Image (cartoon, rainbow, N blue to C red):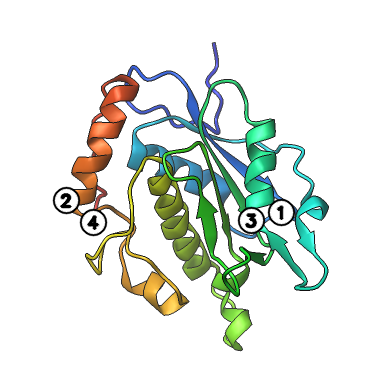
């Protein structure tokens, strides 16, 4: 049987996948690379899977933004039966009612997360586009939000991917991997899924 080229299969007995779902327009980043890196970070096979997500249901005409919580609900509605986690990636400007904007949102210890690249782009700040930097920022926030779905909370370590980021400069400063303490917490969660053992990101 030929393996799906979009899936990286870590060495684990876990069943199920992390689904990476593009929402709205095609993104300029390499979704396959993101899925493979997510698979390596969490030790769970990841696959890019377009689904029928309707952004218009999340649009707020007064703010001219999109409610991230509504998009999370749609991701849950459309999630395949074997989804361990489902991650939406979009270029829409997201918000929650109590904040001006969000880079992403996740269900703490839940299944769904979403990240937007809208406010991660250099162009928003009058700087020339940098697609590599955009992809790096998006990857960090994707791992961060997925970390929340595994029960991780914000971390005080300035280099940990679970460090909270309000501005893109803070995203650029932190790393794309977990600190030792967050890694221990995540490992305990993953062991319950099928003996997954985390590997530290290569430097």
Q: Which residue is mark 2?
A: 180
Labels 2 and 4: the sequence-earlier one? 2
Query: Which numbered mark, 1 or 4, is in the foreground of this view?
Result: 1
User: Where 36 sits versus 197, above or below?
Assistant: below
* Disc 3 to disc 2, C-alpha distance: 30 Å
Q: Secondary structure at mark 2?
A: helix
Query: Which numbered mark, 4 or 3, is in the foreground of this view?
Result: 3
Labels 3 and 2: the sequence-earlier one? 3
| Mark linked to residue 203 | 4
Farthest residue, direction front: 98
Q: Which residue is mark 1?
A: 26
* Disc 1 to disc 2, C-alpha distance: 35 Å
Q: Name the residue: 37% across, 40% down.
A: 150
| Mark linked to residue 68 | 3
How many marks overall?
Answer: 4
Query: Which numbered mark, 1 or 3, is in the foreground of this view?
Result: 3
Q: Quadrant of residue 58?
A: bottom right
* Disc 1 to disc 3, C-alpha distance: 18 Å
């Amino acid at each position: 049987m030929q393996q799906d080229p979009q899936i990286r299969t870590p060495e684990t007995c876990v069943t199920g996948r992390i689904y990476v779902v593009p929402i709205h327009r095609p993104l300029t980043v390499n979704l396959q690379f993101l899925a493979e890196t997510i698979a390596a970070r969490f030790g769970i096979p990841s696959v890019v899977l377009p689904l029928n997500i309707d952004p218009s249901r999340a649009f707020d005409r007064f703010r001219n933004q999109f409610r991230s919580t509504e998009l999370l609900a749609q991701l849950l509605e459309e999630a395949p039966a074997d989804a361990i986690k489902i991650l939406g990636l979009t270029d829409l400007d997201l918000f929650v009612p109590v904040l001006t904007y969000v880079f992403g949102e996740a269900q703490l210890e839940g299944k769904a997360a979403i990240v937007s690249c809208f406010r991660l782009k250099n162009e928003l700040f009058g700087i020339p586009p940098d697609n590599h930097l955009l992809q790096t920022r998006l990857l960090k926030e994707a791992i961060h939000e997925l970390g929340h779905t595994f029960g991780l909370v914000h971390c005080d370590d300035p280099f940990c991917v679970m460090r909270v980021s309000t501005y893109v400069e803070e995203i650029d400063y932190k790393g794309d991997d977990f600190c030792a303490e967050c890694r221990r917490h995540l490992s305990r969660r993953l062991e319950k899924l099928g003996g997954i053992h985390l590997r530290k990101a290569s430097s």
